C-alpha cells in the first residue's frame, strides 16, 4: 500500500509516494537520493543512518516513512548554512574527527542536536549522547574534542 | 621546529570537505542506468557436498533476470593460493558460504526468489578447531590443495588441512636451550574477529557485450583487483577498468580480491546489464572474510641476567575455509615470529590451517597483533619469574640500530627506528615504578603494562608504486597516485609533499576523489602501511621531475643556469636575485616569448619507486630481508579491574612509535587513537562465537565493538622521530602499527593488576573473572568481603 506524505526535508517541502513497508532510510537513500544517509546494519545497531526528525536524532532505519507525514527531517546536507560549512563542521575538520568519513554525517547531526539542546555539554554528556553511533576508525577521541571545541 | 612549510604540520585532510558535507561518494551511493540487484543463497551447513541445485522456481519469479550456481562459474580465485570458489561449486565449506545467486530488477525480488532455490546437500564431517584440523584423521577440507595455483614462496601440504607452513631457523636451538638458566613455556590464544568496518562491502560491475568490463568496488586496491580479476576470469587486463570510490574503512578486510569476479560474471549472465551486490551487516558477518584466530606455543630460554638465548615457537593460524590471503599472514607472522628481539637461537613454525569456519584475510597488523599478544605476554611472564623489571628485561633484548640482527638474520640499519627510546618514553609516561593510585572502591585493583612491537610491510619483493604530478593552466596541480583513501589520510600527506617541494599552496593541489585504474597511477595495493612510504617515494620522484622541467624552461628565459634557480611562492626565481622571476603559470604550460615563439610545453612530472634490496627468503630457514622498513614502537596502559565482575576499564593508553617523521601529526594522532581503541575493543570484547560452525553473533548487538564511552579519555600519542634516510622526508609507515601492541599491553596490565597470567583473548568480564577464580581465588574472596563491608 502506498501513501502520499508531505514533509519538510532540509527546509524544503516534499510530497512523496511511499509504500507501507518502506523505512525512512530507504525513502531518503533510494527514492529521494539523499546518499549521505548511511546504512551500517539496517536494524538499529549502528546509528550511522541517523537523521534529525523535528530536531531529534533518530535512526532512520527504524522509522517507517509513512509516519513522517507533516514532520521535519534534516540530513547532513541540511546542516550547511547557505551552502557554507558551520563552526561545527570546521571543528570536525580541524580536530581530525573524521577518517573514512562513513560515520561523519551521523556524528555531525547528533552533535548539532546535542548542542542545540545543551550548548555547553560536559565530556560525559557528549559520550552519553553519541554512544549509539559506531565509528571504527577514529577511536572517538577527536570526535569528542571537536564537539567540545565547537561548544566553547 | 620543522623547517618545512607543509611537511610536519597538522593540516586538515584534503577529503574533509566532501566528507563533512555528505557529498563523498561510496560504492553503494552509485546507481547506474538499468542496474540490477543481487541476493546470495548461503549454505546452512559447515561442510557439505552439493548434490543438486534446482533453480527453476526462482527463475519463474517475475522480475528475476538470472539465477546462477557455483557450477556456472568454475573459476578459482585467490591472491597467493587459488583456493576460493566464486560460488561454492562441489562443496560448501562454511555456514554462510554463497552457493547460488539471484539477479533481479530489485533487491526485494531477488530476496524473495533466492529462497526458492532448492539445494540438496550431503553432509560431511566438519572440523572447527585448527589444531584438530592438523591431526591425521581430520576431515580434509580442500582435497585439491595440490592442484591450486600457488605462489612458489608458499608451501601447502596436499592431503592435509595445512594451507602453508613457514619455517624460521637461526643459530642452534638445542645449544641455546642448553645454555639457558631458565626455560619458560606457555600457550596463548586469540579467537577469530571481524574487521567491522562501518561500510559493508559493495560491488557494481558491468560486463559489456564487447567484452569490456567496468567494476566499482569498495575495495582497498583497484590495481590488484584488476589484475586478479583478469587472471582468474581470463579477461585481458586492458579490457578491465576498476573504479575506487571512497572506502568506508578497510583495515585489511577489503584488500585482495573479494566479490568483484562474482559481480562481473553476474552482469555477463544478466544480458550485460550492470549488477550491484551489496551485503547487509548480517550477510557481511557470515559471508565476508575475517581475521584469523591464533594458537601459539612459545618456549623461551633465558640466562639469569635476563639475556634471551633461545626461543622456539609454533603458531597455528585458524584461517577458516579459505586461505588465499591468510597464507601470507601466517608467513609474515613466521618471519617476524620473535618480534623486535635479538635472539641468537630461534626455531619457529607458522602454520596456516583450514577449518570449516569463516575464512580469514589480511587484518590491520597482518598477524602481528596476534603474535605480539603471545610473545609480549611471554616476556612479562619471564620477567616476573626472573624477578626483573619488564622494561629492563626488554631493553636488554630488543633490537638496536646498527648492531642487532632480526629473526631473519637481517642486520638493523644505522638509521633504523629506535625501539629503546620508544620503550623508555612510554615507561616515563606511565610513571613506571610508581604504584598506581588506589581505586575508590576497595574491590577494584589497578595495574600497568606495556609491550614493544615491530612491523614492516608484508609485500612481494618487487612491489612498486608510481605517481604523476600534472600542472594545469593556472599552475594548479593534479596529483595522480593509486593509493586508495579508506580513512588513513595518505592522500593528504602526499599532497603536503607536493606542496612542500613545488611551493604551491595545498588548496591548489587536487587529488581526484573518484579514482581507479583508468584515472590514477599504478600502485600495487594500499596495504601494510606501505602507501605513505612507497607512493611517497614515487611522489618525490615526480616532484623532482616536474621541478627540473620548470627550471629547464625558466633557465632559458632568464638566462641563468638551472642550479641557480629555486621555486618559491608559486614562482621560479633566481636564488641570488629573487626579483628576477617567472610565475609558475607563465611556465607550466610552456613559455611564450613576447614575439609568440614558445618553448617547453605542459609540465608533467613522473615518478616511480620499486622496493629494492629485498630478498626472497630462504625456503628452509626463512633467512633474508623481507621489508623495506620496519617501524618499531611501544604501547602501554594503566587499567582498573573490578575483581568481582571481571570488568576492565582502561585509564591510560600511551603509544610511542618511531615513525621517522610525522608528515602530518594530526593524521598520525588519528591513526594512533583509532588503532588503540580498535585494539582495546578486540582485546576486551571481540570474538566470533560459533556453535557447530554456526556464527552466533552476526550483529553489532551481540558482536560488541567499542563505543565512545569505551574509549580511554587519557590517550596519548608520542612521536619519536629518528628519520629513515630513504623514507619520504624520513618517514616510515604507521597505519597498522598502532594496534599491534595494545592488546598485549592491556593483557600485561590486567595480569599485573590481578597478579595472574591472562593467556587468552578476549578479556571479557566473564573470562577475566574465571581467570581470577582459578589463579587468584584469595583476591576474589577479599573483594567479596569488602563488598559485604567486612
Ligand atoms: S543502519 Fe540504522 S542503525 Fe544501523
Ligand atoms: S571515520 Fe570511519 S567509521 Fe568513523
Image: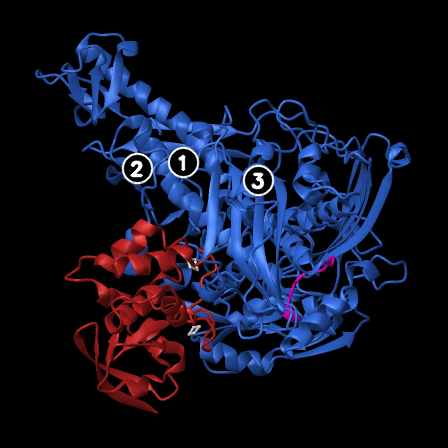
Chain colours: A red, B blue
State ligand 1's quadrant.
Answer: bottom left
Query: Which element is circle 1 on?
Result: loop
Chain letter belonging to callout 1: B
Q: Magenta span has B758?
A: yes
> Looking at the image, is B421 positioned above or below residue B511?
above
Q: Which mark is residue B215?
A: none
Tell which circle, 3 or 1, labels the residue nearer the N-terminal end.
Answer: 3
Residue tagged 3? B633
Chain letter belonging to callout 3: B
As rendered, which of B676 and B564 lies closer to the eye?
B676
> Looking at the image, is B21 positioned above or below residue B473?
below
The image quarter containing residue A105 is bottom left
The image quarter containing residue A34 is bottom left
Q: Position of residue B95 (x, y in %)?
A: 68, 71
Q: CA distance from mark 3 to mark 1?
A: 17 Å
Q: Residue furthest left?
A: B595
Chain letter belonging to callout 2: B
Q: Magenta span has B11?
A: no
Q: Is mark 1 within 8 Å of ligand 2?
A: no
Residue tagged 1? B663
Tell which circle, 1 or 2, labels the residue nearer the N-terminal end.
Answer: 2
As rendered, which of B189 and B29 lies closer to the eye?
B189
Discs 1, 2 touching: Cβ within 8 Å: no
Q: Nearer the viewer, mark 1 or mark 2?
A: 1
Residue interval drawn in magenta: B756-765
**Dominant secondary structure of the residues highlighted in magenta in the image:** loop
Q: Residue at x 28, y 55 (%)?
A: A91
Residue tagged 2? B478
Q: Nearer the viewer, mark 3 or mark 1?
A: 3
Q: Position of residue B762 (x, y in %)?
A: 65, 63
> Looking at the image, is B774 positioned above or below residue B464?
below
Amino acid at each position: 500500500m502506498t501513501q502520499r506524505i508531505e514533509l519538510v526535508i532540509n527546509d524544503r517541502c516534499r510530497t512523496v509516494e511511499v509504500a507501507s513497508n518502506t523505512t525512512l532510510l530507504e525513502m531518503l537513500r533510494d527514492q529521494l537520493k539523499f546518499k549521505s544517509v548511511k546504512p551500517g546494519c539496517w536494524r538499529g545497531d549502528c546509528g550511522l543512518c541517523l537523521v534529525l526528525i523535528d530536531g531529534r536524532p533518530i535512526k532512520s532505519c527504524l522509522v517507517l516513512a509513512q509516519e513522517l507525514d507533516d514532520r521535519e527531517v534534516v540530513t547532513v546536507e541540511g546542516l550547511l548554512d547557505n551552502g557554507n560549512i558551520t563552526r561545527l563542521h570546521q571543528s570536525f575538520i580541524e580536530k581530525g574527527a573524521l577518517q573514512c568519513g562513513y560515520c561523519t554525517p551521523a556524528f555531525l547531526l547528533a552533535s548539532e542536536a546535542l548542542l542545540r539542546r545543551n550548548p555547553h555539554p560536559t565530556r560525559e554528556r557528549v559520550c552519553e549522547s553519541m554512544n549509539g553511533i559506531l565509528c571504527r576508525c577514529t577511536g572517538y577521541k577527536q570526535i569528542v574534542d571537536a564537539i567540545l571545541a565547537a561548544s566553547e | 621546529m620543522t623547517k618545512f612549510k607543509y611537511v610536519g604540520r597538522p593540516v586538515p585532510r584534503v577529503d574533509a570537505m566532501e566528507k563533512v558535507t555528505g557529498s563523498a561518494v561510496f560504492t553503494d551511493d552509485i546507481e547506474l542506468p538499468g542496474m540490477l540487484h543481487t541476493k546470495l543463497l548461503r549454505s546452512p551447513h559447515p561442510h557439505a557436498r552439493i548434490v543438486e541445485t534446482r533453480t527453476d522456481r526462482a527463475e519463474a519469479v517475475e522480475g528475476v533476470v538470472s539465477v546462477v550456481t557455483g557450477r556456472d562459474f568454475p573459476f578459482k580465485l585467490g591472491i597467493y593460493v587459488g583456493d576460493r570458489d566464486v560460488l561454492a561449486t562441489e562443496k560448501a565449506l562454511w555456514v554462510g558460504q554463497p552457493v547460488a545467486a539471484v539477479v533481479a530488477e530489485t533487491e526485494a525480488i531477488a530476496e524473495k526468489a533466492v529462497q526458492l532455490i532448492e539445494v540438496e546437500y550431503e553432509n560431511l564431517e566438519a572440523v572447527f578447531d585448527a589444531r584438530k584440523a592438523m591431526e591425521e584423521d581430520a576431515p580434509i577440507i580442500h582435497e585439491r590443495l595440490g592442484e591450486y595455483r600457488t605462489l612458489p614462496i608458499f608451501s601447502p601440504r596436499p592431503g592435509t588441512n595445512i594451507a602453508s607452513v613457514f619455517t624460521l631457523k637461526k643459530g642452534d636451538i638445542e645449544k641455546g636451550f642448553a645454555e639457558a638458566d631458565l626455560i619458560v613455556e606457555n600457550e596463548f590464544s586469540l579467537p577469530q574477529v571481524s574487521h567491522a568496518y562501518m561500510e559493508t562491502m559493495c560491488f557494481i560491475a558491468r560486463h559489456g557485450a564487447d567484452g569490456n568490463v567496468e567494476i566499482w568496488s569498495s575495495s582497498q586496491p583497484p590495481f590488484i583487483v584488476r589484475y586478479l580479476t583478469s587472471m582468474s576470469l581470463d579477461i585481458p587486463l586492458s579490457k578491465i577498468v576498476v573504479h575506487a570510490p571512497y572506502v568506508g574503512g578497510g583495515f585489511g578486510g577489503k584488500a585482495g580480491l573479494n566479490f568483484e569476479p562474482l559481480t562481473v560474471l553476474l552482469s555477463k549472465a544478466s544480458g550485460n546489464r550492470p549488477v550491484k551486490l551489496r551485503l547487509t551487516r548480517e550477510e557481511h558477518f557470515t559471508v565476508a572474510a575475517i581475521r584469523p584466530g591464533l594458537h601459539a606455543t612459545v618456549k623461551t630460554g633465558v640466562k639469569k641476567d635476563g639475556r634471551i638465548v633461545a626461543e622456539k615457537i609454533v603458531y597455528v593460524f585458524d584461517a577458516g575455509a579459505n586461505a588465499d590471503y591468510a597464507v601470507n599472514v601466517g608467513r609474515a607472522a613466521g618471519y617476524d615470529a620473535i618480534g623486535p628481539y635479538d635472539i641468537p637461537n630461534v626455531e619457529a613454525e607458522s602454520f596456516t590451517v583450514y577449518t570449516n569456519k569463516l575464512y580469514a584475510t589480511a587484518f590491520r597488523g597482518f598477524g602481528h597483533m596476534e603474535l605480539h599478544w603471545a610473545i609480549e605476554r611471554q616476556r612479562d611472564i619471564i620477567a616476573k619469574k626472573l624477578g626483573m623489571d619488564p622494561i629492563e628485561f626488554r631493553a636488554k633484548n630488543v633490537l638496536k640500530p646498527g648492531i642487532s640482527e632480526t629473526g631473519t638474520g637481517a642486520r638493523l640499519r644505522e638509521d633504523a627506528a629506535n625501539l629503546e627510546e620508544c620503550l623508555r618514553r612510554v615507561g616515563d609516561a606511565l610513571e613506571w615504578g610508581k604504584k598506581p593510585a588506589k581505586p575508590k572502591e576497595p574491590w577494584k585493583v589497578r595495574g600497568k603494562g606495556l609491550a614493544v612491537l615491530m612491523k614492516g610491510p608484508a609485500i612481494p619483493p618487487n612491489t612498486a608504486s608510481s605517481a604523476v604530478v600534472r600542472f594545469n593552466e593556472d599552475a594548479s596541480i593534479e596529483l595522480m597516485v593509486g593509493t586508495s583513501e579508506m580513512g588513513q589520510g595518505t592522500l593528504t600527506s602526499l599532497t603536503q609533499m607536493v606542496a612542500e617541494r613545488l611551493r604551491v599552496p595545498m588548496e591548489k593541489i587536487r587529488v581526484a576523489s573518484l579514482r581507479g585504474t583508468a584515472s590514477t597511477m599504478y600502485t600495487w595495493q594500499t596495504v601494510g602501511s606501505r602507501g605513505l612510504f612507497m607512493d611517497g617515494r614515487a611522489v618525490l620522484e615526480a616532484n623532482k621531475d616536474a621541478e627540473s622541467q620548470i627550471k629547464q624552461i625558466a633557465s632559458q628565459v632568464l638566462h641563468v643556469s638551472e642550479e641557480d634557480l629555486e621555486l618559491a611562492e608559486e614562482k621560479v626565481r633566481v636564488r641570488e636575485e629573487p626579483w628576477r622571476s617567472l610565475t609558475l603559470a607563465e611556465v607550466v604550460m610552456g613559455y611564450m616569448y613576447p614575439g609568440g615563439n614558445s618553448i617547453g610545453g605542459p609540465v608533467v612530472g613522473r615518478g616511480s619507486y620499486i622496493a629494492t634490496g629485498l630478498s626472497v627468503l630462504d625456503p628452509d630457514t626463512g633467512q633474508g630481508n623481507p621489508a623495506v622498513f620496519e617501524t618499531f614502537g611501544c604501547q602501554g596502559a594503566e587499567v582498573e579491574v573490578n575483581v568481582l565482575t571481571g570488568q576492565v576499564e582502561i585509564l591510560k593508553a600511551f603509544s610511542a612509535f618511531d615513525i621517522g617523521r610525522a608528515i602530518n601529526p594530526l593524521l598520525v594522532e588519528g591513526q594512533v587513537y583509532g588503532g588503540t581503541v580498535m585494539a582495546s575493543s578486540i582485546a576486551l570484547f571481540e570474538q566470533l562465537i560459533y556453535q557447530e560452525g554456526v556464527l552466533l553473533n552476526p550483529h553489532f548487538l551481540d558482536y560488541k565493538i567499542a563505543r565512545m564511552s569505551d574509549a580511554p579519555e587519557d590517550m596519548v600519542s608520542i612521536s619519536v622521530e629518528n628519520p629513515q634516510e630513504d623514507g619520504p622526508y624520513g618517514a616510515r609507515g604507521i597505519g597498522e602499527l598502532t594496534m599491534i601492541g595494545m592488546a598485549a599491553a592491556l593483557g600485561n596490565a590486567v595480569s599485573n593488576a590481578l597478579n595472574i597470567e591472562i593467556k587468552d583473548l578476549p578479556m571479557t568480564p566473564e573470562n577475566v573473572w574465571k581467570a581470577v577464580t582459578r589463579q587468584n581465588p584469595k583476591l576474589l574472596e577479599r573483594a567479596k568481603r569488602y563488598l559485604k563491608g567486612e
